[in-house]
Image: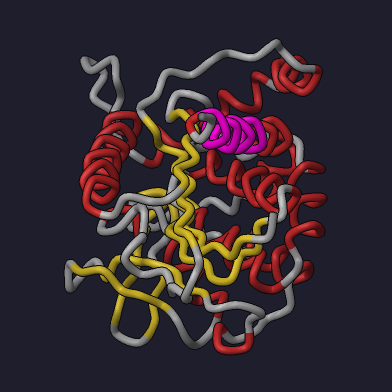
C-alpha cells in the first residue's frame, strides 16, 4: 500500500513517545507522511521526524534511565516553573542541528499558547527549536518560552489535537494519534524495563517530592496541589480533544489510553514507544476487519 497521509500528533507529555511507535508502524505498512502538525510532545516528535532524525532521537530516548533523566532536569527557583528545560534542549541540538521550519523535509507546524494574550499560536515558520520549546512548556512545570514580548506555554491548553492546522494535500488521508484517549488501558506483562525502574523508586519519588516542594501543598488535601493542577489540565485537554475529534473526524484514529503511562514517565521511552506500535497495529487491523465483506 502507498497512501499519503497528513499526520496529527497530540499533546500528552511522556505518553507522546508513543508517536514514535505510531510513525514506525505507519511507514512499515507503506503509508507516506506528507505533512505533520503537533502539539507539545507531538510537536517535538513531529519536528524531529520532519528533520529526518527520528531514528537517532529514538535511540537516545530509549538509552535514558531515571538517573539520566534526573541529570537532564535542571530545576529552577522561578515562580513561573520549576524546570528550565535548557539542558534537555542542548542535548537535543546535538542530535538534531538547529534549523528553520521552512527548510524541513515536509510541511510542519507546532501549536503553542500565548499565555498573556490567551490565544493559540501556530508556528509554521522560523526557528524549529523556538516552536518546539514553546509548545512543550507545560504550565508551572517548564518555564514559559519568551519570544519578544510574548510568553508561550503548552499548546495543549488551546489545541491539543491540531487537526485544523495540518497542511492537506490532494488525495491524502487524515491520521490522528491521540495519546490522551479515555479508552480503558489493557495492562501488559511486566517487562524487564519496568522491573529496572522499580530499582530506582527512591529517585522517582524524589522527583515528585521536588515538584511538591516548588508548589506549596495543602496538607489536608491528599491529592496535592501538583497532582490537582496536573489532573485539571488533563481533564481540560481531554474535553477539548473530544470536541475536536467530533468536529474533524479523521480517516484513521490511533488511540493510546491516558491511563497507560504518567505524563512525566520520561524514563519509560521503550515501553511507551511499544505501546504506540501496538495501538497503531490495532487501529490498522480494525480498518481491515471493518472493510471485510
How far across and how far down the image is residue 104, in percent? 63, 81
Give residue 61's position: percent from left, percent from top: 74, 47
Please state the total of marks drawn on the protein image: 0
Above or below, comparing residue 41 to residue 246 in the picture: below
Residue at image position (44%, 69%) is 110
The extreme left residue here reads 117
Q: Residue at x 59, y 48 (%)?
A: 19
User: With 198 as the anchor, is 55 left or right in this view?
Assistant: right
Q: How would you classify the magenta stretch by its main secondary structure? A: helix
Q: Give the magenta range.
A: 275-289
Q: Position of residue 171 (x, y in %)?
A: 49, 70
Residue drawn at x 74%, y 70% is 52
Magenta residue check for 282? yes
Q: Tell whether 248 sits left or right of 98.
A: left
Which residue is outermost to the front? 293
Q: Nearer the viewer, residue 210 or 50?
A: 50
| Magenta stretch contains residue 31 | no
**Viewer-nearest residue: 163 or 116:** 163
Query: Measured from the top left, where is residue 211 in percent x and y?
Result: 44, 37
- Where, by quadrant of the figure, is residue 266 drawn? top right
Dividing the picture into quadrants, the one containing residue 161 is bottom left
Answer above or below: position of 156 versus 276.
below
Q: Residue at x 42, y 69 (%)?
A: 166
Amino acid at each position: 500500500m502507498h497512501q499519503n497521509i497528513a499526520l496529527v500528533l497530540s499533546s500528552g507529555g511522556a505518553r507522546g513517545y508513543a508517536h514514535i511507535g505510531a510513525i514506525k508502524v505507519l511507514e512499515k505498512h507503506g503509508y507516506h507522511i506528507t505533512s505533520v502538525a503537533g502539539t507539545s510532545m507531538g510537536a517535538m516528535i513531529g519536528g524531529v521526524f520532519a528533520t529526518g532524525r527520528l531514528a537517532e532521537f529514538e535511540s537516545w530516548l530509549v538509552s535514558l534511565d531515571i538517573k539520566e533523566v534526573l541529570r537532564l532536569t535542571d530545576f529552577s527557583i522561578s515562580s513561573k516553573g520549576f524546570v528550565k528545560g535548557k539542558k534537555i534542549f542542548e542535548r537535543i541540538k546535538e542530535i538534531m542541528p538547529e534549523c528553520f521550519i521552512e527548510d524541513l523535509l515536509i510541511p510542519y507546524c507546532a501549536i503553542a499558547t500565548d499565555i498573556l494574550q490567551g490565544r493559540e499560536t501556530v508556528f509554521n515558520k522560523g526557528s524549529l527549536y523556538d516552536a518546539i520549546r514553546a509548545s512543550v512548556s507545560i504550565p508551572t512545570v517548564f518555564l514559559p518560552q519568551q519570544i519578544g514580548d510574548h510568553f508561550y506555554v503548552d499548546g495543549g491548553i488551546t489545541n491539543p489535537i491540531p487537526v485544523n492546522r495540518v497542511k492537506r494535500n490532494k488525495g491524502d488521508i487524515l491520521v490522528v494519534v491521540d495519546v490522551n484517549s479515555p479508552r480503558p488501558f489493557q495492562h501488559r506483562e511486566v517487562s524487564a524495563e519496568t522491573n529496572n525502574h522499580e530499582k530506582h523508586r527512591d529517585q522517582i519519588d524524589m522527583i515528585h517530592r521536588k515538584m511538591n516542594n516548588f508548589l506549596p501543598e495543602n496538607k489536608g488535601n491528599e491529592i496535592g496541589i501538583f497532582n490537582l493542577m496536573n489532573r485539571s489540565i488533563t481533564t481540560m485537554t481531554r474535553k477539548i480533544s473530544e470536541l475536536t475529534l467530533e468536529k474533524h473526524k479523521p480517516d484513521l484514529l490511533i488511540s493510546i489510553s491516558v491511563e497507560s503511562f504518567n505524563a512525566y514517565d520520561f524514563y519509560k521511552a521503550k515501553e511507551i514507544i511499544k505501546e504506540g506500535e501496538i495501538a497503531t497495529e490495532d487501529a490498522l487491523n480494525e480498518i481491515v476487519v471493518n472493510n471485510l465483506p
